[in-house]
Image (tube, rainbow, N blue to C red):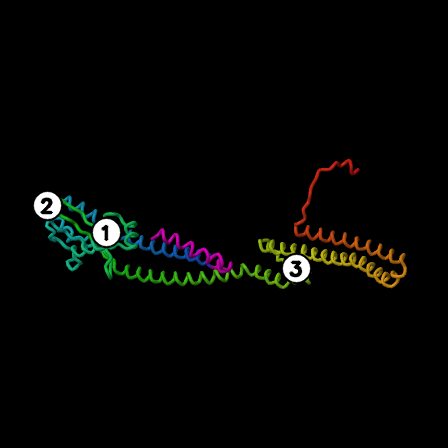
């Protein structure tokens, strides 16, 4: 399943990102980054609060268990039970003592939840583990168990004591009720705050991307306004000392080169027209002369024909030069390079 998603996601996401506007890409990147930071921060805060709570419960129940185990090993069971009844252990920790037959011989809080129900709930929880259970397993030691009931949590551990050829089990339970309600409300608050934060990050990312790309939009609009007939306009360059300033300067340099190129082209067309007009005028003049007097005057006819032929040759040479320049501009002119003796040119 995971490998299939890895094959599908690039084909699904990449084409859409490829044709997505840059402003939307930047907004998406900013929102994802801010959302990740927000989620990580809120998750770390919630996990830290849980850790402090679990640590406090672990310390209290561990101290009670160590103290009770030490006293139980020093005295007989009846004396130990008597001492426990006289002075309770750490407040909030319930202790129950069972013999080898699982019979309860002492219960500090008889109305408390039964050991059987605690162990049964623990077995069900181990069979149906959730994400929170794996996190708690990392935060809690192996000998301390956590049971999640509907309205409260229970931390549970046990110790074994051998007395008078009998094995006794000391059960220690710590209930957390008010803290669970607080953490549940806190988790919901953090969840909704995270959603609001993600929405705000998307809006901020979109606004920030528009602000960052506004100079680029201004450059694009200005370039669209520039016409071929009016290349004197230039893009206003702001002294920002960044890539956008460099881009604007590059556009201005390009416009200068285009302007020079068009001016040279106009001058070339004007010069070429003048050069072509001269032989054309001469040919027209001699043609008229030939039509009027050439029929009756052989000398005039010969002069007109010679002049027309000469100007036609000049026009042909000029046209060949123009074709040469046109082929050179289109990079279709074939150049034959040969080695020559430079002394022949001197």
Q: Which residue is mark 3?
A: 234
Q: Is residue 228 magenta?
A: no
Position in image of residue 315 (x %, y %): 78, 55
Label 3 SS: loop
Image side of residue 109 versus residue 278, left or right? left
Q: Give the CA distance from mark 2 to mark 3.
A: 100 Å
Instruction: Using a 10 Å C-alpha cutoff, classify the residue at mark 3 as few (fewer than 14 neighbours), some (14 to 19) or many (20 or more).
Output: some
User: Pointer 2: what residue?
Assistant: 166
Sequence order check: which comes first, mark 2 or mark 3?
A: 2
Which mark lies nearer to you, 1 or 3?
Answer: 3
The answer to whether residue 167 is seen in the rendering is: yes
Instruction: Identify the residue at horizontal 52%, vertical 61% (top origin).
Output: 210
- Magenta highlight on residue 17: yes
The front one of 102 and 6 is 6
Measure the alpha-carbon separation of dots 1 and 3: 75 Å
* Residue that carries the numbered disc 1 in the rendered image: 145
Q: Quadrant of the C terminus?
A: top right
C-alpha separation, residue under disc 1 versus residue under disc 2: 25 Å
User: Nearer the viewer's eye, disc 2 or disc 3?
Assistant: 3
Q: Which residues are magenta?
A: 1-27
* Residue 108 visible in image: no
Residue appearing at x 74%, y 57% in the figure:
267
């Amino acid at each position: 399943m995971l490998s299939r998603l890895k094959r599908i996601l690039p084909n699904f996401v990449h084409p859409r990102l490829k044709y997505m506007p840059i402003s939307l890409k930047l907004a998406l990147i900013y929102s994802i980054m801010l959302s990740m930071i927000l989620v990580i921060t809120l998750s770390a805060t919630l996990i830290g609060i849980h850790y402090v709570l679990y640590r406090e419960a672990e310390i209290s129940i561990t101290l009670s268990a160590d103290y009770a185990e030490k006293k139980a090993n020093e005295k007989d069971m009846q004396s130990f039970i008597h001492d426990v009844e006289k002075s309770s252990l750490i407040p909030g920790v319930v202790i129950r003592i069972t013999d080898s037959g699982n019979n309860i011989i002492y219960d500090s809080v008889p109305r408390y939840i039964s050991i059987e129900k605690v162990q049964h709930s623990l077995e069900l929880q181990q069979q149906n583990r959730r994400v929170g259970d794996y996190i708690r397993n990392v935060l809690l030691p192996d000998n301390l168990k956590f049971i999640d009931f509907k309205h409260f949590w229970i931390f549970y551990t046990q110790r074994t004591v051998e007395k008078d050829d009998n094995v006794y089990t000391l059960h220690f339970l710590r209930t957390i009720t008010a803290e669970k309600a607080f953490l549940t409300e806190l988790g919901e608050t953090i969840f909704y705050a995270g959603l609001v934060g993600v929405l705000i990050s998307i809006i901020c990312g979109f606004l920030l991307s528009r602000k960052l790309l506004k100079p680029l939009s201004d450059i694009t609009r200005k370039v669209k306004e520039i016409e071929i007939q009016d290349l004197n306009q230039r893009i206003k360059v702001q002294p920002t000392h960044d890539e956008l300033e460099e881009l604007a300067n590059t556009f201005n340099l390009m416009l200068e080169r285009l302007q020079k190129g068009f001016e040279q082209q106009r001058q070339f067309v004007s010069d070429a027209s003048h050069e072509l007009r001269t032989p054309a005028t001469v040919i027209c003049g001699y043609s008229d002369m030939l039509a009027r007097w050439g029929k009756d005057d052989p000398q005039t006819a010969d002069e007109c024909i010679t002049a027309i032929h000469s100007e036609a040759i000049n026009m042909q040479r000029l046209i060949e030069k123009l074709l040469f320049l046109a082929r050179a501009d289109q990079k279709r002119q074939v150049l034959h390079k040969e080695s020559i003796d430079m002394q022949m040119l001197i």
